Image (spheres, grey):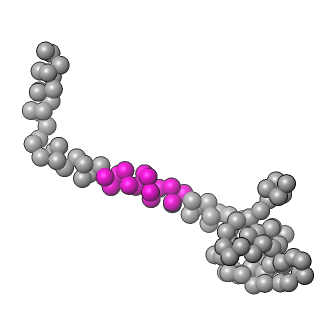
Amino acid sequence: MCVIADLSALAVALPQGFSSILPLVLIPVVFYFLLMRPNQQKQKQWQEMLGNLKSGDRITTTGGIRGTVVALREDVLHIRVAPDNVKLEVVRTAIASVTTEEERK
């Protein structure tokens, strides 16, 4: 009996329109934490990876080409691709991942 009285007191204390506005406020908050924030963190890690590139790193491009970084410039990389040691010029934003020695084993 006491619980029902507490709930009715709570309902009286809240403004009438508050219960209908609450979902409209919570939906953007939920979308931010489920969709936007993880994507921002992934973007930050990718930018950090691009910033840490150095000559000799093994990379994989978004097109699936694997090679070794030979030279770095501001917006492009020169990579050497096996088996014929062909040198390619690749835009820095086309780098999908850096392959470390541990990943290759």
Q: Nearer the viewer, residue 14 or 65?
A: 65
Q: Is residue 105 above or below residue 46?
A: above
Which residue is depicted at the point 9% across and 42% down? 16
- Give the quadrant of the N terminus: top left
Examine the structure image and report whether residue 39 is included in the region drawn in magenta: yes
Q: Is residue 30 above or below residue 47?
A: above
- Where residue 13 sits, quadrant-wise, is top left
Which residue is depicted at the point 89% across and 81% down? 85
Which residue is depicted at the point 56% across and 63% down? 43
- Where residue 91 sits, quadrant-wise, is bottom right
Q: Main secondary structure of the magenta part?
A: helix
- Give the quadrant of the C terminus: bottom right
Magenta part of the chain: 27-41
Q: Is residue 71 above or below residue 4?
A: below
Q: Position of residue 73 (x, y in %)?
A: 73, 80
Which residue is depicted at the point 76% across and 69% down? 59
Q: Position of residue 18 (x, y in %)?
A: 16, 44
Q: Nearer the viewer, residue 33 or 83?
A: 83
Q: Residue furthest right?
A: 84
Q: Position of residue 81 (x, y in %)?
A: 83, 78
Q: Is residue 60 above or below residue 6?
A: below
Relative horizontal placement of residue 36, taking residue 29 as reference (left or right): right
Relative horizontal placement of residue 68, taking residue 18 as reference (left or right): right
- Where residue 31 sits, quadrant-wise, is bottom left
Q: Residue furthest top?
A: 1
Relative horizontal placement of residue 84, taking residue 3 as reference (left or right): right
Q: Position of residue 35 (x, y in %)?
A: 44, 57
Q: What number of labels is visible?
A: 0
Q: Nearer the viewer, residue 63 or 94?
A: 63
Examine the structure image and report whether residue 28 is included in the region drawn in magenta: yes
